[in-house]
C-alpha cells in the first residue's frame, strides 16, 4: 500500500499525518471486465487511481445513448468520481471498466478532508479537473465537427493500398500534414486506434492490425 | 479603476503590492456589438472581467460551424481567454460580443505572474476553469441528447427569464448559434411553435404567448 500511495501525484504535498490517514482509509478494488464503476447519481465513490486496466468515462442520455468523454489508464487519477467533493462540478458522468481493472479508491470523505486542509491538494484537484475539461473538449470537437477518426482511417487504408503494405512508414507530423490536422491530434487518435487494437505503434511506423476495423470507421 | 478591481472575486487574495501591479496594468476595453474578442490561436489576451454587456464563447469548426459553449455577463470572469497561462487548457475557443460590451482586461503576463506567486489566485483560476467545464458539459448534453423542440423551449424560457420580457429580440440565426442547431431547423421549429399558439413571430422578434405550454415541452 505504501508503494502504491507513493505513486499518487499529490503524495508529495501531504504531511506525515495526512499520509497516515490515507494509508488507513484507501483500499484496492478489482472490477471485472465490463463492470460498472460509478454513476454520480447513485453515490459518491471518491477519488480513483488506476493501478492497472482502464476506466471509460461517458455521458448517458435518457434514451440510453452513450458518449465517451475520455479513458483513463494505469497511473491516471479520476476526479469526476469525487464530484460530490467539488461543488463546481455539477454534471453527472458514468464509468465502466472495459477490461479487468484494479483501482485504488480514496473515499470521498477522506479526499474532502484533504481538500479542505491542504491547499496544494485543493489546487491539484482543480488542475486535474481542468485537464479533464481539455479531454472532453477534444472529444466534443471530434463528435461535433471533425470526425478525425474517419479522416485518419481513410488515410491509413489508402496509404496501405498504395504501398501494398500494412506497415506505414510515416511520422505523426507527416500524417497530420496529409489529412490537414495537427500532430497532437493525430498522435492522440493513433493512440486511441492502438488501444482499440486497430494498429500497433512503433517509432516512425504504424502497423495495421485490423484492416476491417479501420475500414468500418470510414 | 480601484472600485472596478474591488469587484474582482480574487481581489481579496492579493497582497498590497499585487493590487498595485494590477492597478497599473489592467485596462478597460470597449467592444462594439458583433465585435470579435478573442481566438486562442491568434493571441493570448489575458483574463477578462465583464463590466457590462456579454461575451459569447464558442467552438468553430473548420467548415465555419459554430457551437456556443457558454455566455458570460456582468461581473463574470473569463479564464479561457488566458488559456496560454494555464497549461492544462489545450483547446481553442472563440469569443465575440453579441452586444456593446465593456471589459476589464488583465494582461496575460500579469495574470501569469499572479498565478505563479499567489497560490490562492492559482487555485481560483482552476476553480473557475472547472466551473466552465460544468457549463460546457451542460451545453454538450443539450446539443447531443435533447430534441430540438426541448432545446428551443429551454432557450426561450431562459432568455425570457433573463431579460424579464416575453419579447425575444433575436434572429433565427442567432438562436441557432445559441442552441447549436441550424437556422433552417430553428425557423421550422419556431413556425411549428407559432402554429401551436406558443409564440408569435415577427421580423427579428419572437413573442412568447403561452409560457406554460413552452415549459411543458422541456
Image (cartoon, coloured by chain):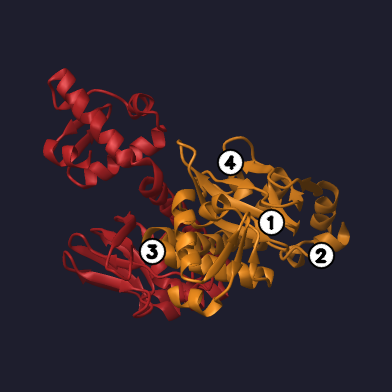
Chain colours: A red, B orange
Q: Are marks 4 and 3 in contact (CB under 8 Å)?
A: no
Which numbered mark, 4 or 3, is in the foreground of this view?
A: 3
Q: Are marks 1 and 4 on the same chain?
A: yes
Q: Marks 2 and 3, how far apart in space?
A: 43 Å
Q: Marks 1 and 4, how far apart in space?
A: 18 Å
Compared with A43, B114 (above or below) is above
Image coordinates of residue B155 in percent, x first then y, are 53, 65
Which numbered mark, 1 or 3, is in the foreground of this view?
A: 3
Side of A159 relative to A142 (left or right): left
Q: Is residue B149 visible?
A: yes
Q: Nearer the viewer, residue B159 or A134?
A: B159
Residue for badge 3: B147
Sequence-earlier tag: 2 or 1:
2
Q: Residue at x 44, y 81 (%)?
A: A109
Q: Are marks 1 and 4 in contact (CB under 8 Å)?
A: no
Compared with B66, B149 (above or below) is below
Q: Marks 4 and 3, how far apart in space?
A: 31 Å
Amino acid at each position: 500500500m505504501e508503494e502504491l500511495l507513493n505513486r499518487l501525484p499529490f503524495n508529495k504535498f501531504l504531511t506525515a499525518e495526512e499520509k497516515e490517514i490515507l494509508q488507513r482509509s484507501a483500499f484496492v478494488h478489482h472490477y471485472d471486465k465490463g463492470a460498472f464503476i460509478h454513476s454520480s447519481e447513485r453515490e459518491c465513490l471518491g477519488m480513483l487511481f488506476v493501478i492497472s486496466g482502464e476506466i471509460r468515462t461517458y455521458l448517458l442520455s435518457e434514451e440510453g445513448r452513450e458518449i465517451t468523454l475520455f479513458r483513463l489508464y494505469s497511473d491516471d487519477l479520476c476526479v469526476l468520481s469525487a464530484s460530490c467533493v467539488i461543488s463546481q462540478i455539477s454534471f453527472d458522468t458514468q464509468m465502466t471498466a472495459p477490461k479487468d481493472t484494479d483501482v485504488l479508491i480514496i473515499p470521498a470523505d477522506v479526499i474532502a478532508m484533504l481538500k479542505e486542509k491542504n491547499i496544494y491538494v485543493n489546487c491539484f484537484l482543480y488542475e486535474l479537473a481542468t485537464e479533464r475539461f481539455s479531454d472532453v473538449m477534444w472529444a466534443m470537437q471530434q463528435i461535433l465537427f471533425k470526425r478525425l477518426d474517419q479522416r485518419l482511417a481513410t488515410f491509413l487504408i489508402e496509404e496501405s493500398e498504395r504501398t501494398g503494405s500494412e506497415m506505414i512508414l510515416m511520422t505523426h507530423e507527416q500524417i497530420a500534414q496529409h489529412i490537414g490536422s495537427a500532430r497532437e491530434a493525430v498522435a492522440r487518435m493513433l493512440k486511441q486506434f492502438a488501444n482499440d487494437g486497430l494498429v500497433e505503434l512503433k517509432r516512425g511506423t504504424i502497423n495495421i492490425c485490423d484492416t476491417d476495423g479501420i475500414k468500418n470507421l470510414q
